[in-house]
Image (cartoon, rainbow, N blue to C red):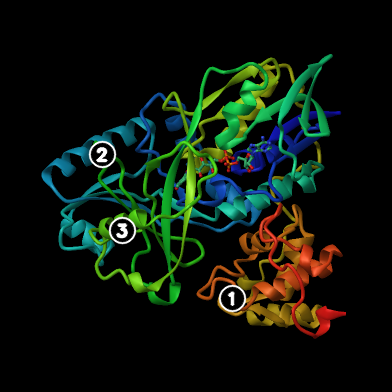
């Protein structure tokens, strides 16, 4: 019997698990997928929003500002990439200027520090590549970017280092109350827990309904992106560039990423199908047209990939956070700024569980600093790298040439909590396959390493779990043909 079962290993579930792992509790995280970070947390803009956007008094405003304040330290403790690059909301007209003033006031009310309204000269001094059309901007120096993959992986990994259990491929389809516990079923499998935290993203409404809470619904809003080859965009922008929101929407952004690429997007399209991750020709056209108004000379011929993320849009317009049943906490409709808010939501999760009667007794030996993460090989000096290669030659065997990822790092990604189990899992942890060739050269080697490390046949290694088979059989001779 677990004290707490968390449903969903996105950024909210992962950081809730980490928070709870500081206490003398038996915690598990279940996810329907084969890995951590496969939902909205995998496909978003990766912005740590400063907090000027959310309406004062809402959960979104409260947790955005607190999360943004916490994020840098959390990332330092977990060894996750975080860059305080600052954001600029660009304006083009007098109407935009007035809207930016309102945003400034809203930000001040929300407690965002150091906001500034800039005229064209002020904008150009910071970001010389903006187009001639730009006349003004709202500058938020506290805006930042983060690696969402790193945050999920290290957050859950840290929880597991401290005793939490991660159960993959466990799709909760029924929940029953038995005595003083909840029993969560995934087909024939079950998990029993005294308390439940529902962090199921797009499906948080479905999970809440399993214990009788049908007070809200969640629908998907598609956001498409294009990613530019970093070789062609070293000086396109270091900032996160938004455009002034209009009644038609917030528009897309042009942003630096912690991986060194520039990303364009996301679009916003209401959907009903919670599994529709298609990219579309209309989405691509819209991104191209909009982003061309932000910065000059975007090299659209340097797009190396495109992808879609689905926002979990709740029916109330705000984050939906409440007890769905006794001892059953729901985090529903956690759309943007959910990534930014996640550390603060995790803090609140512990408070809510305590209010529901869970005894929280701190572990004496818990440290916020993760010491069992994989080595950040790329951050080392050549001397340090050479020392490691002498001890473990796998670190000298380059597998992903585009991103410079060695076999040693891939093995570490598989062996370090919560262990990659498929090609996409290795990619999110190491960036292998995220470069110009998009895995063309390294994928087959990564399949071999996964097969060897997991002790399974080559043909059983998947792209992202389930039926995502990569190799159906052997066609030629060679070492795999025995
Ligand atoms: C296009 C886009 C752009 C965004 N940009 C930003 C941004 O720049 N900054 C920001 O702060 N926020 C941003 N967000 C929002 C942010 O990504 C989300 O708020 C955050 O990732 C939500 O995390 P989560 O853990 O609640 O959900 P998810 O990451 O979706 O995780 C939910 C998990 O629940 C699992 N699950 C679902 N059903 C079941 C079940 N029945 N049984 C077991 N497991 C289940 C899923 O497999 C999934 O892993 C953006 C979102 C999108 C889509």
Q: Residue at x 30, y 47 (%)?
A: 251
Residue 321, horizontal then vertical, whole percent: 55, 24
| Residue 149, visible in the rendered structure | yes
The residue tagged 2 is 248
For the residues labelled 1 and 2, the Cα–Cα distance comes to 39 Å
Of all residues, the one furthest to the left in this rendering is 94
Of all residues, the one furthest to the bottom in this rendering is 478
Q: Quadrant of residue 422?
A: bottom right
Q: Residue at x 64, y 41 (%)?
A: 15
Q: Quadrant of residue 462?
A: bottom right
Q: Which quadrant contains ligand 1?
A: top right
Q: Nearer the viewer, mark 2 or mark 3?
A: 3
Q: Name the secondary structure under disc 1.
A: loop
Q: Quadrant of the N terminus?
A: top right
Question: Left of 383 or right of it: where is 258?
Answer: left
Question: Left of 71 or right of it: where is 357?
Answer: right
The residue tagged 1 is 440
For the residues labelled 2 and 3, the Cα–Cα distance comes to 17 Å
Q: Which mark is residue 285?
A: 3
Question: Left of 102 or right of it: where is 41?
Answer: right
Q: Residue at x 33, y 36 (%)?
A: 107
The crowding category of the residue bearing disc 3, from other C-alpha atoms within 10 Å (few below 14, some 14 to 19, many at least 20), is few
Residue 471, horizontal then vertical, whole percent: 71, 68
For the residues labelled 1 and 3, the Cα–Cα distance comes to 26 Å
- Look at the numbered discs 1 and 2 and tell me whether their residues touch, using CB distance below 8 Å: no
Q: Quadrant of the C terminus?
A: bottom right
> Which of the two discs, 1 and 3, labels the residue nearer the N terminus?
3
Residue 37, horizontal then vertical, whole percent: 62, 49
> Which of the two discs, 1 and 2, labels the residue nearer the N terminus?
2
């Amino acid at each position: 019997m677990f004290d707490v079962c968390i449903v969903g290993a996105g950024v909210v579930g992962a950081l809730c698990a980490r928070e709870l792992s500081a206490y003398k509790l038996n915690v598990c995280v279940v996810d329907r997928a084969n890995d951590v970070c496969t939902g909205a947390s995998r496909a978003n803009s990766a912005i740590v929003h400063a907090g000027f956007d959310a309406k004062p008094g809402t959960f979104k405003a409260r947790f955005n500002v607190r999360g943004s304040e916490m994020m840098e330290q959390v990332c330092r403790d977990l060894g996750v990439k975080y860059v305080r690059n600052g954001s600029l909301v660009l304006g083009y007209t007098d109407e935009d200027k007035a809207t930016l003033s309102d945003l400034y006031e809203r930000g001040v009310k929300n407690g965002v520090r150091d906001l500034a309204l800039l005229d064209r000269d002020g904008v150009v001094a910071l970001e010389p590549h903006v187009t001639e059309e730009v006349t003004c901007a709202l500058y938020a120096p506290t805006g930042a970017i983060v690696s969402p993959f790193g945050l999920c992986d290290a957050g859950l990994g840290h929880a597991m280092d401290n005793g939490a259990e991660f159960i993959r491929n466990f799709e909760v389809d029924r929940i029953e109350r038995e005595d003083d516990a909840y029993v969560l079923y995934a087909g024939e499998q079950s998990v029993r827990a005294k308390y439940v935290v529902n962090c199921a993203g797009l499906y948080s409404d479905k999970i809440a309904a399993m214990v009788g809470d049908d007070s809200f619904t969640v629908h998907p809003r598609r956001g498409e992106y294009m990613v530019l080859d970093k070789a062609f965009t070293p000086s396109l922008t270091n900032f996160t560039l938004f455009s002034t929101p209009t009644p038609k929407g917030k528009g897309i952004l042009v942003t630096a990423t912690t991986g060194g690429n520039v990303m364009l997007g996301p679009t916003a399209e209401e959907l009903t199908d919670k599994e529709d991750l298609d990219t579309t020709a209309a989405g691509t056209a819209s991104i191209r047209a909009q982003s061309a108004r932000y910065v000059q000379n975007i090299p659209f011929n340097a797009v190396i990939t495109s992808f879609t993320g689905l926002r979990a849009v709740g029916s109330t317009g705000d984050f939906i956070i409440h007890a769905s049943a006794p001892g059953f906490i729901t985090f529903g409709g956690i759309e943007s700024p959910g990534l930014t808010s996640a550390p603060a939501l995790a803090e609140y999760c512990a408070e809510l569980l305590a209010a529901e009667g869970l005894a929280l007794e701190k572990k004496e030996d818990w440290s916020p600093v993760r010491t069992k993460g994989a080595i950040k090989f790329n951050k080392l000096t050549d001397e340090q790298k050479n020392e490691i290669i002498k001890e473990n030659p796998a670190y000298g065997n380059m597998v992903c040439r585009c991103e410079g990822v060695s076999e040693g790092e891939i093995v570490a990604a598989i062996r370090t909590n919560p262990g990659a189990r498929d090609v996409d899992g290795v990619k999110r942890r190491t960036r292998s396959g995220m470069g110009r060739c998009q895995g063309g050269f390294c994928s087959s080697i990564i399949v071999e390493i996964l097969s060897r490390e997991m002790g399974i046949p080559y043909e059983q290694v998947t792209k992202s779990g389930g039926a995502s088979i990569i190799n159906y059989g052997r066609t030629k001779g060679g070492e795999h043909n025995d």
